[in-house]
Amino acid sequence: MGTVGLSFGSATSGQGFDVATTVTQIQAAESAIETPWQTQLTTLQAQDTVFSSLGSDLSTLTTSVQALTDFAGVFSQKEGSSSNTNVLSLTSASNSAVAGSHSVLVDSLAATSSDYLDPIANASDTLAGSVTFQVGSGASTTITVDSSSNTLSTLAAAINSAGAGVTASVISDSSGSRLSLVSGTSGSAGQLTVTSVLSDATTGVNLANNTGTTGADASLKVDGIALTSASNTVSTAIPGVTFQLLAADVGSPVQVEITNNNTAIETAFSSMVTAYNAVVKDVSTQEGKDSSGNPEPLYGNPTLSLIQSQLSSALTSATGSGSVTNITQLGLSFNDDGTLSLDTDALDTELNSNFSDVTGFLQNSGSFGQSFATTLNNLGIQAPNGAVYLAQQQNSSEEASLNQSITNENSILAAQKTSLTDELNTANQILQSIPSQLSEVNEMYSAITGYNTGNG
C-alpha cells in the first residue's frame, strides 16, 4: 500500500480531515492493479468487433459459394423460349428440365364445357322447378327451387354452394338475363350434362337449357408424338417444362428451346467475387494502422494470417474437371491488391462451350468448388472448428477470466473501503475532539491553580 499523507492542519484546530478523499487516495494504488486488466479487455473487445465483421463476411462468401456448388443451385436452373408466343407460351422450366430443343405442333385447343338457360326479360322474376347437372361420369346433382333460390341470382348462389364442380353465374345483355353453367373440369372428361325443368313463374315461360361449349381435349404433337391434354396448360409433355397453348396452328410447329440459365450463374459468380473481395479487404485493413497511427486490433494475429493463406491457396490450387482446370478459364483473375475480378463475357463463353465441365469443376467430389467450400467452413464461424469461431471462443474465455479478476478485486477494495472508512472516521472524531479536551484541561487547571489560562 502506498504512503498517504493526511492534511488536516494543526492537530489542535479541531478541523480533522476529509475521510472519503483519504480513503480514495489510500486505495488508488491498489486499484491500479486493474488498469492492465481493463486495457487487455478493451483490446479483446476491439478484436471481437473485427472478428464479428470478418465472420459475417466469411458467412456471406460461404453462402455465395453454396449457390454454385449445390446440386439444386443455379447450375440446375433452366430457361425456356417459344418461337411463336401467339401459339405457345412457356410458363416455366424447373430444375429437372434438360437443355434441348423440342418441336410442338398444336392441332386444337382444349375446351371447357358450358351450358346456359333461355333468357328472361326481368332477372328478378320468380322461378319454379328444378335443374339437374352432371360433370362427365360423376354423380348428378339436382337443385330444387325454393324460397331461398327462386331468382336467377339466388339459384346461381345455391348451385355454387352445392360444390358439385359447376360454376353458375347470371349473364345479362339487351335480350335479357340467363343462367350460365360452366364445368369445373376442362377437357372432354368435364363434359357438362344439364336437364332443366325450370320455368319463369312470373310469365309462365319454360326455361330450356342450351349447349354453350362442348368439352374437348387439346390435341398436339411433341417431337412427333401425338398427345392429348385436358387443359391448355401442359406440364407432362416435356419433362420439367410447363407451357400454355394459346392457339391452334396446324402445319406450323413451334420450337421450344430449353437452355441453361447462364444469367443466374453469372450473377452467382459476381456475388461470390463481391463477397470474396469483402473478406480480402477485411484482412488487408487489419494488416496496417488506424488513422491515429495505432495498430489495428488484429494486427499480427495468427488467425488473420491463416485466413489469408488458406483463401489464396484454395483459389490457386484448383482441381480440374475435364477441360476446366483453373479459375482463370471462368473469367476470374487476381488484382494487385489480392481481390478478384470477373469477366462475365469469358464466363458466358465457357458456359456455352463446356457447361458440364464447368459444373463438374464446382460440384464433383474433390473438385475446386467442393474444396473451396470446405476451406470456408474451416475458416469461418462454424462450430466447432471454424478459425474465427475458435478465436472468438478463446477471446471469450480470456474476457471471462479478466472480468472475474476485476470482480474479485472490486470485492476486496469494497471491503477495504468499509474498514478504512470506519477506522479513519474514528481517528477523525478523536482529532475533532482535541480542542474540547484541551479546554476541559485548561478549566481544571484554572480551578486548581486559580490561574486564568484564557488570559494566558
Image: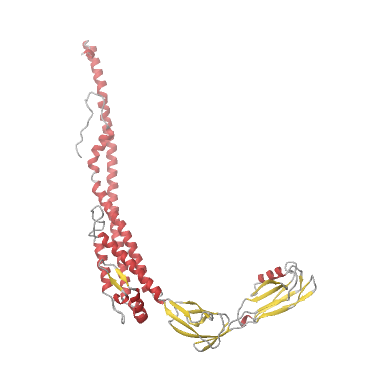
Query: Which color scheme is applied?
Result: secondary structure
Residue 428 coordinates in the image, percent (x, y): 26, 29
Do we see residue 92 in this rendering?
yes
Q: Is residue 125 above or below residue 222?
A: above
Residue depicted at x 67% and y 72%? 168
Q: What is the count of numbered marks?
A: 0
Do we see residue 385 in this rendering?
no
- In the rendered image, the residue lying farthest to the right is 204
Quadrant into which the N terminus falls: top left
**Residue 167 sits in which quadrant?**
bottom right
Residue depicted at x 62% and y 76%? 184
Residue 98 coordinates in the image, percent (x, y): 43, 81
- In the rendered image, the residue lying farthest to the top is 450
Residue 93 coordinates in the image, percent (x, y): 47, 77
Q: Is residue 23 above or below residue 91?
A: above
Q: Is residue 417 above or below residue 243?
A: above
Give 114 or 251, whichever is nearer the viewer: 251
Give 398 or 254, whichever is nearer the viewer: 254
**Residue 444 sits in which quadrant?**
top left
Residue depicted at x 23% and y 49%? 36
**Residue 454 sits in which quadrant?**
top left
Quadrant into which the C terminus falls: top left
Residue 278 as seen in the image, left or right of residue 454: right
Residue 295 coordinates in the image, percent (x, y): 23, 55
Give 179 or 134, whichever is nearer the viewer: 179
Residue depicted at x 28% and y 60%? 391
- In the rendered image, the residue lying farthest to the front is 174
Residue 275 as seen in the image, left or right of residue 447: right
- In the rendered image, the residue lying farthest to the left is 3
